[in-house]
Image: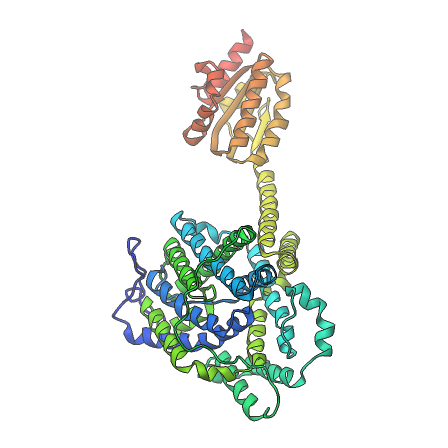
Amino acid sequence: MVAPASVARPGRSGRIFNYIGRNNIRGDFFGGLTAAVIALPMALAFGVASGAGAAAGLWSAAIIGLVTALFGGTPSLISEPTGPMTVVFTAVLATLTTRADSPAQALAIAFTVVMLSGVFQILYGVLRLGRYITQMPYTVISGFMSGIGTILIVLQIGPLLGQAPPPGGVLGTLQAVPQLLQGIQPMETALALITLALLWFTPERVKRLIPVPLLALIVGTILSLVAFQGVELRRIGEIPSGLPQLTLPALGPDVLQLVVINAALLGMLGSIDCLLTCLVSDSLTRTEHQSDKELVGQGLANIVAGLCGALPGSGATTATVVNIQAGGRTGLSGLFRALILALLILAGSGLASQIPLAVLAAIVFKVGLDIVDWGFLVRVPQLSRKGALITYVVIALTVLVDLMVAVGVGIFIANIITIDKMSLMQSKAVKAVSTADDALELSDQDKRLLDQAGGRVLLFQLNGAMIFGVAKTINREHNAISDCDAVIFDLSGVYHLGLTAALAIENAVEEAIDVGRNVYVVGAGGTTRKRLDQLKLFQLLPEDHTELTLHEALTHAVEAQRS
């Protein structure tokens, strides 16, 4: 049941800290405890899958959860390492491993990318870009997330078959599939399949008692120790039980471009992932998060995570929903969760050394399957062929080329299609006529005046938002200027005049003046008039040709023709 807004209210915009209430301590404790239990298997799995190690995943869950609980803008949000963020970090680390002098240097530079991504997120928040970041077409978001899910799935093929992931990322793994199948380790694969079966087929009544990833982790580990005795299985190994070591930023001129580009991508991806989860939190708690403040909190969290050698993180939908369902309503639940995780890492990290890598690979594989937007991928061809094209292109580019390229190309194609549709719609709002037409928005008196002109007065009537795509229509219509004596531009129905459209109007006015026509510009007000003033358009015309109403301009033009 959702708590009342008085319990789950968001912090005021002037707050430095997140809203941490004291009137819901019991609910926040159980929310934090449940979210911590959920976080353990996922943090371990993402840490191992990333190549940075299990400790990097565990400390990420604790550190990012702590900082965002203190400085975020969504009281019930839980932040931790997520699949999308892990994919980008893994790709960055894999690239740096081939270019750095040593694995340690590659890790240091990768964590520098995490820190810089946090700086980008803070910048997005300070510039108040929060409300714009999630304004991407769903086709792009779905394709991007499905591509990330596919990457997670492909990268687990090696571990599921009992072998280390091949070098070369997705393409390297796909090319190495024949070799991986030849070198399959049957026992590890069997253990991975058992884990997948638990993740898929655990009854709902059991799921209500214990989170399925944790159940799979425990059962898989026990099976490996009891039923697979004497079998050589790859395991996590010893996890350092102390506090995380400080990682100083490391950067070289040869990798500067790589670091900056991937940091910007990581920051943008984390922002989108987080703000979408914030919307889920809002719908469950009936509150409204503070997007820009949340971005600042997420940025601070990733800076601290990078300094501590931990994975990047973002708002996690599953953990957030679990926290809310268990009673968490304020940032106190995030603080409880972070404290519980830290105690588990410091006191119980030795127990995790026996966890088989095949079990963790199965957990990540299932996460990848869950990230893929299967429902939309099936429906989108029936909904929109152009939408399907965008979605599938973004998936292909995400998996086979580059995450940044995928987002850029997807947004570009979507915007071009949208602009084309809007331009087609708005072009119908540009009318150039010299005789009265029923489609014209004119009074009967003005229609009679236009008819009296005998086709020698050309009326340009523009309505709505004149975006740059309309400029072509304006340029095409003003060819009729050569067949008239006077031209009237009626802008009274224009509520937005883009620069390109304004330049097209200026060009039409100048052309009419050059061929000796009487030109009137009427009805321009507000931002439309300001735009034309900036172009100094009114200086080209007599004052009595710009300060008239449409009726006065028509009367003036008809009388001038008669004289």
Q: Quadrant of residue 451?
A: top right
- Is residue 280 rendered to the left or right of residue 462? left
- The answer to whether residue 313 is seen in the rendering is yes
Which of the image's four quarters has the N terminus? Answer: bottom left
Q: Residue furthest front?
A: 101
Colouring rule applied to residues: rainbow
Residue 200, given in percent of the width and then of the height, sits at 57, 79
Rendered residue at 53%/17% (across/down): 519
Q: Quadrant of residue 518?
A: top right
Query: Height in image: 104 above or below 190?
Result: above
Residue 32, given in percent of the width and then of the height, sits at 36, 74
Which of the image's four quarters has the C terminus? Answer: top right
Closer to us: 385 or 20: 20
- The answer to whether residue 523 is seen in the rendering is no
- Disc tally is 0
Rendered residue at 62%/66% (across/down): 150
Q: Residue furthest top?
A: 563
Rendered residue at 45%/67% (across/down): 310
Q: Quadrant of residue 98?
A: bottom right
Query: Height in image: 126 above or below 148?
Result: above
Residue 88, given in percent of the width and then of the height, sits at 55, 61
Residue 35, given in percent of the width and then of the height, sits at 41, 74
